[in-house]
Image: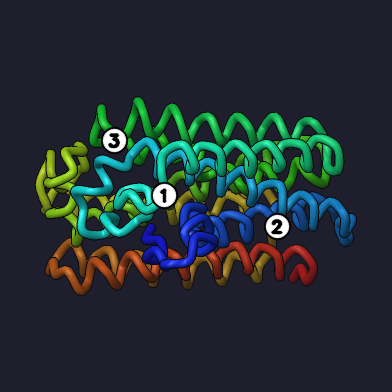
Amino acid sequence: MNSEAPLPHPLAQYWVLTKPRVTQLAVFCAVIGMFLATPGMPPLDKVLFGALGIWMLAGAAFAVNCLLEREIDARMLRTARRAVASGELSAARTLQFSIVLGGAGMALLYFLVNPFTMWLTLATFVGYALIYTLILKPATPQNIVIGGLSGAMPPALGWAAVANAAPVEAWLLVLIIFVWTPPHFWALALYRREDYEKSGLPMLPVTHGMHFTQFHVWLYTIALTATTLLPYAIKMSHHIYLVCALLLDAAFMWQAWKLYRNYSDAQARKTFRFSIVYLALLFAALLVDHYFPL
């Protein structure tokens, strides 16, 4: 996903390091997991401290990502203005910021939420900031598929914050985001393909071509449709969610089909942007259905 362009004030530069738009969606999905973890209202302190701790560790992971990819970011038009890539923030300060933010988030989760959530969130941090960024992303065009698990973890983290456990229902929410990630990200990669050619990263449109990527965006939306029906199939959700999921899936598949059959950068942007709205509305539907089952 895109992050905001760096602003001149140092505090704004640190803020942008956390990729606010991405972290907002992640925390939103985590909070939905918190509410789904209990039949009633979750404890307010768990929601507040859990959301804050998850945000802090997510922000720290994104800061490490910016640090490790600063040379790659400098070659890409979309990311060249990031403070670390442009040299406005030094590597040392970025690392210090990540350590402080991540350490504070770990302490918050451990002492004010529960140790299980802290360890699960820390594992997610390592998975994204180190395993995905250092190993998977530069090694394979399937990087976003394999590494998507880290980005899909927020619902399980939120569930763990309230229930001190991560049952199958929580992992089903993770699975939905896991399957959603490839069509979401590849739509971005399609219209940013020239950037990725300059970066040297083996992104699918660069290694396998545009048409191949367009087709896989379409295939993954079909897989996503099947995945989003699982909460209803296991009686985790009810008719409100089912209707909303079917409508959202049909809309996403239509966008992906248009992208596959008649490519344009404008359609790729539209598909990418819709994918974000899609995920937010799908999880909102889960929440409404949880409290108003029909």
The answer to which of marks 2 and 3 sits earlier in the sequence is 2
Check disc 3 and report its element: helix, strand or loop: loop
Amino acid of disc 3: Gln
- In this rendering, position of residue 57 left or right of residue 108: left
- Density class for disc 2 (Cα within 10 Å; few <14, some 14-19, many ≥20) is many
Amino acid of disc 2: Val
Q: Position of residue 212 (x, y in %)?
A: 14, 47
- Density class for disc 3 (Cα within 10 Å; few <14, some 14-19, many ≥20) is some
Q: Are marks 3 and 1 in contact (CB under 8 Å)?
A: no
Residue at the spot x=79%, y=57% of the render? 48
Distance from label 3 to label 1 (Cα)? Answer: 31 Å
> Circle 2 sits on which residue?
31
Residue at the spot x=61%, y=47% of the render? 154
- Identify whether 294 is placed above or below 130: below
Disc 3 versus disc 1: nearer the observer: 1
Check disc 1 and report its element: helix, strand or loop: loop
The answer to which of marks 3 and 1 sits earlier in the sequence is 1
Residue at the spot x=37%, y=61% of the render? 2
Q: Is residue 62 visible?
A: yes
Asked where in the image residue 174 lies, by quadrant, the reply is top right
Q: Is residue 221 visible?
A: no
Q: Position of residue 124 (x, y in %)?
A: 57, 35
- Identify whether 53 is placed above or below 16: above
- Of the pair 45 and 294, the residue shown nearer to us: 45
Checking the image for residue 142, the label placed there is: 3
